[in-house]
Every structure is written in structure tokens, then in C-alpha cells.
Amino acid sequence: MLSIAVIILIAGLLAKPVGIYMAHAFDYNPTKVDRLFGWFEKPILRLGGIRKTNQSWKQYAFSLLIAGGVMMAVVYAIFRLQHLLPLNPSDIQAMEPTLAFNTVISFMTNTNLQHYSGESGLSYLSQMLAIVFMMFVAPATTLAAAIAMIRGLAGKPLGNFFVDLVRAITRVLLPVAFVTALIFVSQGVPQTLEPSATATTLEGAEQTIARGPVGSFLSIKEFGNNGGGFFGVNSAHPFENPTNIANALQILLMLLVTTSLPFTYGKMVGNRKQGGVLFAAMGIMFVVMLAVSLIAEQAGNPALNAIGIDTSQGSMEGKEARFGAAQSSFYSVVTTASETGAVNAMHDSLTPIGGLVTIANMMLNTIYGGIGAGFINVLMYAMIGVFLSGLMVGRTPEFLGKKIEGKEMLLIAVTLLAQPFLILAPAAIAVMVYPETISNPGFHGLTQVLYEYTSSAANNGSGFEGLGDNTPFWNISTGIVMFLGRYFGLVAMLAVAGSLLAKKSVPESSGTFRTDTALFGIVFAGTVILVGALTFFPSLALGPIAEQLTLKP
């Protein structure tokens, strides 16, 4: 518990300076950051014919979509031809077409859902040239979109997507990923192009030990809120998470950008108190979720106690003995709150309430949320809170001096309704049409399906597992959900930013609802919880809640 408190404290202390740094990093006015990275960025921008020309929201969104589409096509070709390409010492064959389709969309949408086992599904070339490449450009894309939206809310031009994309990689992702990769290697994470090693066990049997360029993969996996594992068991594997120091660093990396963005926002819009209020509100929700999960996992499973398995000191089912119930629970809350998706324990083995917390984090998608896209959701809920408050007092709501009217609320409402539709509709189809792919009957089986589509729509990527998901149905359906879950919301909220940018600022008056007070923090948190409960509580009642109620001592 002390180590958990220390990690949270360090993340909280780093949030503000990192947030202010990112505000300077994306500032188009000359800054000291330009001197550090300008020499490296200018040749890249010149080679691409990119100028620092401001784009409209439509141009920004089109650039984002077309760049993503081209990169997905190139990576799909690599997956399908990997058996013919170099750096394939284990002679891994081409990916099956629907699995390649799913994997390309998964990593380009920052989801990193894996319907294959990491060490046996991809060659070294595919891991480095395709997967790690997308682990940089996918979070850079959403971080750029979040910065553009913040500029629009601040009454400034949205900027240029390609400039922001390059800056997100060179100024934020690459420096931290490079340094932390070296730290992970120092902790024992492999970084090699040698093929799998063969060892003889004490019983005389031969064992194949997978390895590869894991250190460089692991750093951007966590810092970019990606989450996909080099190995099938992800960060429960001793090569991908060898020590408690490595485990703590992974948690810090998952939280670093997501906790910093409120301060970036406050700096860029000229209202640091509002950024602090959003940070505090999300922090309180995070601590509550963590407390519920820790209590549930430490209490253990009464059904196991009844058959002689003592879980009174914490349920260890599906957890690494190296980390224990508390650190595993902490990791599960962080990875779903930050929309990373990495795991150091089997979420399918969490207690029903522990599993409920992980799903709820993804459904709300605002408890810090993923790199960029999560904070866009935070701003969406903030505007909903302001709108509802305005209705209650009979005033046209204002956010940062701009009136929120019918056009903006229509876009926000459609975005808000898209996520439950993307989760609940395909989940219902899967339960009715493909029940044979669900390994557990009853309430837990429904939770498995619900978790899979929630993870896809929220671009988290972690899995409850237990599903036979490497089939055309699961590959295609989750691929579509991941694509729409990521790009629909980004484009819609860029449209909101463009609409507000075009409006004239309204002078603040005595009737203006201030958004930099504790009252607004309460309204924001209440809006998130109320909307989330009204949307998802029935499905959760049929899944993890019903399972918890049926556990018998």
C-alpha cells in the first residue's frame, strides 16, 4: 500500500511540470523547446512538404484520416508478407487476412487489442517496423487532435495536423521512450535480434524461450498508452516486467501524459485553475475506483473459501506472485483508467467487483483517459455539465466565453450515444449468434463479451480473455468497433472546436457559471457518473453485479 501511495504521489508531482512543458512544445510561437528539437524537425517537415499553415477543422480532420488510412494500408501489407520479408528467424508465416485487418486497426487506433499471441504471431520486422511504428504515430495522432481542440476552445487557430503529429513524436514520445527503454533493459528486459533460445529443463525436456527487441517495444507501449504485449501474457511475463522497479515505472509511464493534459489545457486556454479543477475531479474518481478494486481483491472470493482455498489475505487467482493482489489490482485500475490496456494479471480472474471497476473505467473513459482522446472526452463531459447547469438556471450555457448552442450539443450528443451503441449492439449479436465462442456460461460469459467490445470501443485493448476471439466474426466486428470508436469521436469533437472557434467571445457576467471552482468539479464528476450509470448500469447489472450476488460463502 505504501508503494502504491508513493507511485501516485510521484505521478501527481510530475503532472503539472510535464503539462506545462507540453503546452510549450505545441506552441507555434518561438520557445526554448524549438532550440532543442527544431534542427531535427525541420528536415522532416521539409521532406514532407509541410508548412506551419493553420488548417480548418475539416482540413485537420481530413489530414488525420487520410494519414491514418495510408499508414494502415502499408502495415497491412507488411503483416500479409512477413513470411517473405527479412528479420524473421522463427519463420513466422503471413497473418490470416481478417486477423491482419483486426491487428492493423487495433494498433493504428491506439487500442492494441491482440487476437494473436505476441511472440508467435509476428516476425521481428513486423514488431519493429509495423507495431512499434504505429505505437508512436497512433498516440501522436490523438495527442495532436486534443491539442487542436484545446486551441479551438482557447479561440486560437487549430494548427496543422502534420506539424502537431511530428512534434508529438519528437518532443514528447520519442525522448521519454528512448530513456525509459534503456532503464527497462537495465532491469533485465531483453533487447536482441537473436532468435528464440532453446533450453533443456531439469526433467530433460526441451523448452523454447521467446525473446526479441522487447525493451524498445515496452517503453512506448506504456508511455503511449498502447498496451499491446510483445509476449502473449503481456506484462505478466518476466521478460516484459522483470522487477518491481519495472512494474512501478510502467505504471508511472501510463499515467504521465494523461494526468498532465489538464495542466496543458489550463496553460493553453489561460485558465490554469480550470485545468486544476479537472485534474482534481478526475483524481478523486480515480482514487475511489482504486479503493473499490483494492477492497474487492483483498477481500478474496467467498466461493473459493468455501471449498478450502483461503483467499482471506487477497485473491491470488490469475495474479503474479511477484506482485501480489494489491499491485495487480492497482495495475488493472491504472491500465483501464488511462486506456492503456497492458496487464500484469488476468482480468478474467479478478473478483466480480474488481472486474466491474475495470469495465466502468473504460465505459466512462474520462478518469484521466487515454493519451489525447481521453481528455477530449473529458472536455465533452465538461461541456455537457455546463449545458445542464445552464438549463437549470435558464441561461444559455457558456464555456470559455463561447455560447454552447444546439449545433454543438447535437454533435456532442451523437458522440456520447455512439459509444454505448458500439458496445451494446455487437455484444447482443455475439451472445445470440456466436455463444460457442464464449468459454464461461451465465453472468461471467456475458461480462467477457461486454468487456471485449467495451475495450474495443474505448480503444483500451485489454481483454477479459476466455473468448475464442481469433475468428472472422470477432476479428471483423471488433475491428469495426475500434475504428468507429476512435475516429468518429475525434472528428465530431474537432467539429465542435471549429464551431466554437468561429463564435464571438461573450463577456463574463454575474450570471456566468464559472468553470474554475470546486462547484464545477462536482458538477463535472456528477455528470460523468450520472450519464455513465444511466447508459451502462443495466448491462453491468446482468454481468459482474449479478455474478457478485451469486457468489456463496
Image (spheres, rainbow, N blue to C red):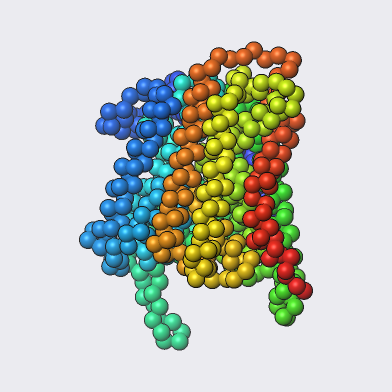
Q: Is residue 420 visible in this depiction of the protein? A: yes
In the foreground, 439 or 262: 439
Res. 322 visible in picture:
no
- Is 91 placed above or below 477 here? below
Q: Quadrant of residue 329?
A: bottom right
Please tell me whether residue 462 is drawn above or below residue 311 in the rendered image: above
Position above or below: 135 against 312: above
Q: How many labels, in total?
A: 0
Q: Which residue shows up at 54% across the image and 38% down it?
A: 415
For residue 57, side relative to residue 292 (left or right): left
Point out residue 443 in the picture as x, y percentages from the top left corner: 64, 66
Please give the name of the residue rendered at 54% of the width and 26% of the height, measured from the top-left corner: 407
Quarter of the image with the C terminus is bottom right
Quarter of the figure with the N terminus: bottom right
- The percent position of residue 404, horizontal first and vertical second, equals 60, 24
In this rendered view, identify the residue nearer to me: 89 or 116.
116
Q: Nearer the viewer, residue 103 or 294?
A: 103
Q: Residue furthest left?
A: 84
Please state if 497 lies on the left or on the right of 77 as rendered. right
Q: Residue furthest bottom?
A: 203
Q: Nearer the viewer, residue 547 or 153?
A: 547
User: At x 38% / y 74%, what residue is drawn?
Assistant: 208
Q: Position of residue 84 (x, y in %)?
A: 22, 61
Q: Residue furthest right?
A: 553
Residue ID at (46%, 45%): 484
Coordinates of residue 139 in the picture (x, y in percent): 45, 42
